[in-house]
Amino acid sequence: MFWEFFRFELRYWFRGWMVYIFLAIMTLLFFAAASSDQIVVGQAMGNTNRNAPFVIQMYYAMSGILCGLMVTAFVDSAASRDFTAKSSDLVFSKPISKGAYIFGRFFAASIAALVPTLGTSLGILLAKFGPWIEASRWGAVDWSAHLNGIIVFAIPNTLIYASIVFAISVLTRSTLYSFIGTLLFLVAYVISGSFLEDMENERLGAMLDPMGIGTFSVITKYWAVEEKNTLSVGLSGLMLANRALWMGVVSCILAFAYWRFTFAEGSRRSSRKELKLAQEAAVLKPMRFVEPRADGFASHFQQFISHFRNDFRGVIRSTVFLVLMLTCLLNMIPAIWFDAAATYGQHAFPVTYNQIDLIRGTSLFFVIAIITFFAGVLTWRDRDVRLNEILGAQPYPNWTAFLSRFLTLAIIIEAIFCIGIVVAVLAQLAGGYTRLQLGVYVQELLVIDFVKMCFLAMLAFLMHTLAPNKYIGYFLFIIAVVANAFIWSPLRIDTLLVKFGRTPGYTYSDMFGIEPYRPGLIAFGIYWAAFCLILAWLCTIIAHRGIARPLLQRIRFGFKELSGSAKAFVSAATIAWLSFGGWLYYNTQVLNEFTGSHEQEIRQAEYEKKYKSSEKDPLPSITDIQYEIEIFPAERNLVMKGKQDLLNKTTVPIHTLAFTVMPTMETSINLAGAQRETVDERQGVWIYKFDTPLLPGKSTQMDFEVRIISKGIENSVSNIEINQNGTFFNNSLAPAMGYTSGRELTDPKTRAKYSLPKSDGFPALSRESAECMHHYIGESDWVNVETVISTSADQIAVAQVHWLSNGRKTVAVTIDTESTILHSISTPSFQRATKWLATNGTMSTLKSIIIQSTPGMCHGWWSRSKVHSSTVPRTSGLIVTSKLVSLNSPGPPVSPRRSQARCPIRRVSASSRT
Amino acid sequence: MHLQIHELSKRYPNNVQALDRVSLEIPKGMFGLLGPNGAGKSTLMRTIATLQEADSGSVRLGDLDVLGQKHEVRKILGYLPQEFGVYPRTSAVELLSHFAALKGIPASERREVVDGLLSRVNLYQHRRKAVASYSGGMRQRFGIAQALLGNPKLLIVDEPTAGLDPGERNRFYNLLAEVGENVIVILSTHIVQDVKELCTNMAIIDQGKLLYSGTPDAAERTLAGRVWQKSVTKVDLPNLEKHFRVISTKLVAGRPLVHVLSEFDPGEGFEAVAPDLEDVFFSRLSVVA
């Protein structure tokens, strides 16, 4: 008898789609979490292997929390289905035993509910095949860790949820209460977790944790990376005790459910409303004949409103939405709340851009999952419930239905972001941080991310409209997304004009916001929005309306029945799209030189092959430099004029001197006593030949001028060090002498592709500063630097002397001791910088840091290796001060061209967090 | 206002000729469309209901070109398909209000119209229940309520009584007859009795071809004096089918009662019988077969 119910229930679930949908979602989630840092589940994994046993078990512990609502969906249905589907009479009139019925259902539903949790293993195992992963962070597959994850976390935690939900469901026979119960349990769990953390008796706290997560962290508290990479926690010791205790609790709850369960139909008192309805039965309402009005915008708008109300209600009433949405919030809210208080054991301000990153990292996955799933549900809903014929014969234009579906998804996306923002702002306030940048939240999430998600939703709707059924629609959408992500690089296509929905990459900075990126973001945004309008138009023209018809027929009749306004709409959208496209093409490819990443790679390889032999050629040293720098922040332009005295400190005469110039800058060089002999336009290498060789001990003078002129919109913003507020560059803008090893390809695989030898890498860690200085500053020793900088009137380079001349602020800086060759210049707008300091840092910290960084010291706030983030000052407290320090002392090399140079004396600062 | 169907043809991709140059004139009142399953009834009705395109031919409703002016037709159309489902967890009021909005009933009057219609089809007391939980008869009544929204000039109901018990069927037809006095009602069915009872005009189609159109009485008159019946045993049947044009065989009190078509008295115990619509139906079909 037990097995009858068990088998029936199991078959019921495995023939449905819910198990597979949830499994797919969990697999994708952990696939993304294990293979990238963008998607966050639980805590960041630190520097262990990405598939370390510790990580696997941590993910299993987290999936226990996330899967709670999924378990509820299964078990609640198993417990109350006979009552809600009114099959109770049919089932209960048979001679069945209560135990067999209850436990058969319970265990089968628990097994079905366990399946999505296994997506944790599946995701981690598959993540290894992600094309973007770093192979060095992946160890061998540790099956015992997966097994332990399942035994220690997945099975017991599923049973805990299942028993609670089952008991609630048996008592109330209400799905709503089951979900509320699960949520209350989770909330109670999270809150009590923070109390248990502070308990004196760690072991007791570990025992009382129903999910075993606290137990896990107590056991693994002192594990080193090596242990995390090799060990997993099995059922023994403290963990065994905890799990045994809670399985005992599960048994008690089940026994209680068994005791309370009755086959009798719930004696639900008929509500007052129902009684009233029954009395009304006799009342005959009069028939009203109202002339319908289905023409004109006002009527169509009412139709749209009704469509929207119906679609929106349909989505939010569905179980899958409930589960996805709540799981998303469960992943997002604690992450934001707890991350705000402490990061990596330090106290850091919950600055806005950090909160935004947290919202993104924890919610984008679910937003994408919701778009993917519900674009299909909304497109096919009418057909799935077989209302398509009735609806198809109603006098509404297709755009009302399409707009309603689109808006439904759009509002859900915005709602998720809005919840994230509210939580993030509350977390900031709770952390005593009052600089609420609501505008930045709105710009980043409610506008930029939202628009991107809308493009994605548009693509999903298009694919479903083209497809003959829902499943092919899902398939086409996934193919389209994957193709759009991965096809362009192998095809050597870099222009964003063909990558659907892509806008130029950008990084928000507290100094300049997104100012340098804004024109590109807006222009490409409009370009793709116009394209999406065309797609939307297409979706309404060939919509699935009425009975199923082949695509070609839908296209043929759709175009035949085209109305005048539809024609006008698509013409306007096409004109907008094409004109923006043409203008962007002119901007990105004609006005600015466009070098694809593949072409860039080839050039780098060529450079190394052609010039590597000259790496050891003798070079003169720079002894004195005079700079005259004009900065135009609003236009993002810069003119740097320099005079350098070059002295041959080597023991051999120098015959020729090569300069490396940047193709994005206009450069001119005048080297006294030498003529330009060859020009390598492609590589930007100019070789000068001395009329008479520069003998040892002799010196010469070099004048140069470098102009960076920003022109229009680029495919990806270059020269970001010159920007509206917080310009920060160093002398690497000047033409470099000799061979520039920074141009070499670094990735071993790429080097192998161009048959380049393995690179030497960085010198061994040592205190011997000779080696250090060599790498840091090249061939020069201490130099005398004189700089005259001018910038716009509202900006300032904090320095000893400054005066105003003809409406611009000009600063002359003479560093009063000899300096290293690396000097950087920074011009924030002064007011903003001080205001920032006043709210976020104290002057004393600033002072102490200044004292630490006396000019000439080889210290560094070494930026992260990623070129993009290293060029953009994403100011957090410490970085700002370090940036201010860099105004009058050599600071970190931040330019991408020199960031290859590294000093062994490294200090990791708070800025190491992206 | 008449509905004129001219030379309408439709062939499906799987090569089924669903409609084969069908021409029909349908006046005001109840019009019965009779045909066996798969005859092309639903294709014809869906085409008139703007849900599907024809390969050739035309359909005109008064001044309207039904195939070209879909939106105009939908405004005056009520359509109850052969089968339909509903959204889960959606009450009758919610769903009917949605349809009313799509039909173009202004928001201010929607509530009144919806209540009136639900009361008319006897669902008012169940209006807050999910339509998905309705019984077959209730759901069909809900279907007719939505079809009556917005006072349609053209009402198309496709096999509306399938699955209804006799009482429900009667109620349904009374409702339909009441509505059908002033508008065109096209009723498709494979139950001959329905047409006989309700319709002033009718057509028979099979395998996409129009076999007959006219009034039921006229249809019966075409067979006057040519239908004969005889009660036989099962073993006689094959022999009879060899010698006579058998229209139909049905069991009466356990014995097969055979109707045959013959210009003269076939003798052999056959007796003359007044032709009914069923004889017309089956005789027309057997001509095609």
Image (cartoon, coloured by chain):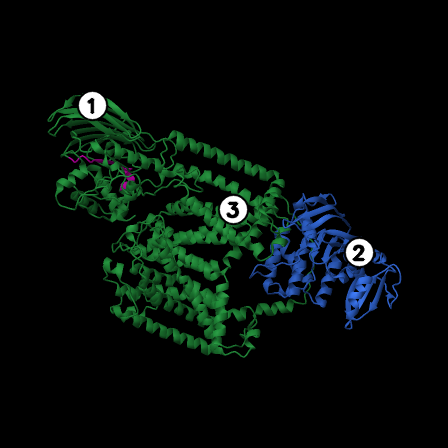
Chain colours: A green, B blue
Magenta stretch, residue numbers? A819-833
- Does the segment drawn in magenta span residue A381? no
- Local SS, label 2: loop
- Kindly identify which numbered label has been placed on residue B200: 2
Q: With A884 as the anchor, is A717 left or right in this view?
A: right
Indicate the secondary structure of the residue bearing disc 1: strand
Q: Residues within 10 Å of mark 1 (few under 14, many from 20)?
A: some
Q: On the image, which quarter does residue A125 sit in? A: bottom left
Mark 1 or mark 3, which is nearer the start of the sequence?
3
- Disc 3 residue crowd, few under 14, some 14–19, many 20+, Cα 10 Å: many
Discs 2 and 1 lie in a common subunit: no
- Give amino acid for label 3: Leu
The amino acid type, in three-letter code, at marker 1 is: Lys
Q: For the residues marked 2 and 3, what is the alpha-carbon distance in whole angstroms? A: 48 Å
For disc 1, the marked residue is A689
Q: Is residue A578 visible?
A: yes
Label 3 lies in what chain? A
* Position of B40 relative to A820 (above/below): below
The chain identifier of the residue carrying mark 1 reads A
Determine which residue is flagged by label 3. A462
